[in-house]
Amino acid sequence: MLNAGRVETGGKFIGYVLPSPAKAPRSTYGKQVADRWHRISKEIAKGRSCLFLVGSISPGPLARCTDTSLLPDGKFQAAVFQTIERLEPDLEHLGTWHSHHPNGLSEFSSGDIRHYESVVVDPNHGPDHFVAGLCVDERGLAFGLFELFSRKGAHRRVRLTTDQVIVDDSFPSLQAIVEQTEDELRSGRRPAPLESALATAFVIRERQEDSESTSWVVEGRSGPPFLGVVTMTTGAQPHVALSVNMSTPELSLQYDASGVHNTVGARKLTSELLRVVGDLETAVRRARDRS
């Protein structure tokens, strides 16, 4: 792990471009955030393009960094992005951020600017914009500097003001998936089919493994909060047990099930879990309507 107090650190922004008319991503994540996506498009974007920054890829294990420079591990970052892109085909590389904590500089360097200007005009860079973030003190990136570089237009480089940058902690993030993917690539561990299936629909908060079983703790990316535990035993015919708890101020619901894992069981179980969660959400809404 990089010591942000002594050397520069940073990351690669990933996210989505909100067009007009707004269309949520074509993925499980997109379905889960669709309502808020359309609300932001109508109430905030108002026909303008919007960039959703929903994750940051770390510099990588082979990054080279000093108190005045940061050279990321490009191959590692590309592998992380490509892995997540299989789940989120509309995902884009939207920019980068880095920290000037070690040197105290409050502005981007001339080298930073030249690099951003070259990236945004590169044909291999998909979006027409590139976001650059600078963390200048211990308060974090939310209190830092943001600039937007454009491929075309009269103002090709602009500093974003506070009303143009919205930090919304309630909007579902992909950061948990980013960190999980990074851990897998660093360790060389290939996720089990069931884990991959679960990751397409949920945030995997924890993974525990012993000689008898593997368990995943999952939670939703949106909607009423719930916590689920999926446990798969080892052996020639591994069994899968599922436990889901969803709680609101009005009520708490528990669902438990078990089955046999087979070649198609991973996808079927994930679909079943989604159906169960949908039923639970319906029950919660009906309970609220009757109260």
Image (cartoon, rainbow, N blue to C red):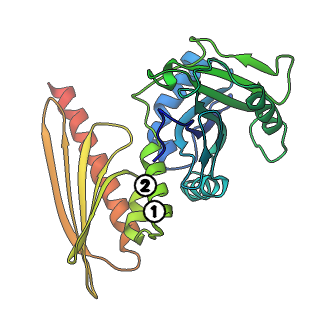
**Can you tell which mark lies on residue 180?**
2
Q: Residue at x 48, y 49 (%)?
A: 178
- Relative to 24, say whether 271 is above or below: below
Please, which residue is most extreme toward the bottom here? 236
Q: CA distance from mark 1 to mark 2?
A: 6 Å
Percent position of residue 43, x then y:
54, 16
52 left or right, relative to 108: left
Percent position of residue 260, x then y:
26, 77
- Relative to 256, say whether 262 is above or below: below
Task: Rate crowding at label 2 as few (under 14), some (14 to 19) or many (20 or more) other CA atoms within 10 Å.
Answer: some
Percent position of residue 210, x then y:
22, 72
Residue of label 1: 184
Q: Secondary structure under badge 2?
A: helix
- Tell me, yes or no, whether the two marked residues, 1 and 2, touch with CB atoms within 8 Å: yes
What's under tag 1, amino acid-wise?
Answer: Glu
Q: Residue at x 60, y 15 (%)?
A: 164
Percent position of residue 75, x then y:
65, 58
Point out the image quarter for the C terminus: top left
